[in-house]
């Protein structure tokens, strides 16, 4: 197979088997190419395994608490993990996100 598929979805933090609608849209930029915007679930895109360009994925959330977008950056397709699970915590007072892979690393 000469393509990889990137899927992005929200999952219930108490039960990862349960998906939920978390993102309003996803924007993906590969190298200098124009942004590709996905506006409906499932958020999925195929990328050539030969891609050597950087990949930026911007997660847009629904307007609750004036959440700012969150960006994921990868050097190229080879640096995108086969499966990546993480938790995002938003601080509405500071307007910033915190990413962690430790489910016990809850915000204060």
Image (cartoon, grey):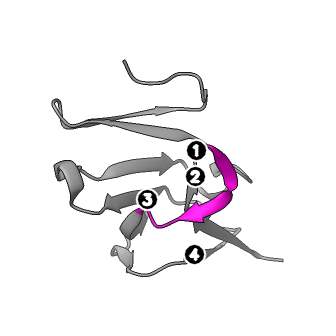
Q: Secondary structure at mark 1?
A: loop
Magenta stretch, overall SS: strand
Dot placed on the residue nearer the N-terminal end, 1 or 4: 1
- Measured along the vertical axis of the image, is residue 84 above or below residue 44? above
Numbered range of the magenta stretch: 13-22
**Image depth: mark 3 or mark 1 in front:** 1
SS at badge 4: strand
CA gap, disc 2 to disc 1? 4 Å
Q: Earlier in the sequence, mark 2 or mark 3?
A: 2
Q: Which mark is residue 57?
A: 3
Q: Residue furthest right?
A: 1
The quarter of the picture where the N terminus appears is: bottom right
Residue 22's place in the image compared with 15, above or below, is below
| Residue 106 point in image, percent of width and height | 48, 24
Q: How many numbered marks are there?
A: 4
Q: Position of residue 69 (x, y in %)?
A: 29, 53
């Amino acid at each position: 197979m000469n393509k990889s598929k990137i899927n992005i979805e929200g999952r219930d933090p108490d039960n990862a088997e349960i998906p939920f609608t978390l993102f309003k849209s996803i924007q993906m930029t590969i190298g200098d190419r124009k942004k590709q915007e996905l506006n409906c679930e499932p958020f999925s895109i195929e990328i050539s395994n030969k891609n050597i360009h950087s990949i930026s994925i911007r997660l847009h959330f629904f307007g609750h608490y004036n959440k700012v977008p969150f960006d994921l950056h990868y050097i190229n397709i080879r640096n995108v993990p086969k499966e990546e699970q993480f938790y995002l915590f938003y601080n509405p007072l500071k307007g910033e996100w915190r990413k962690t892979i430790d489910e016990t690393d809850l915000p204060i």
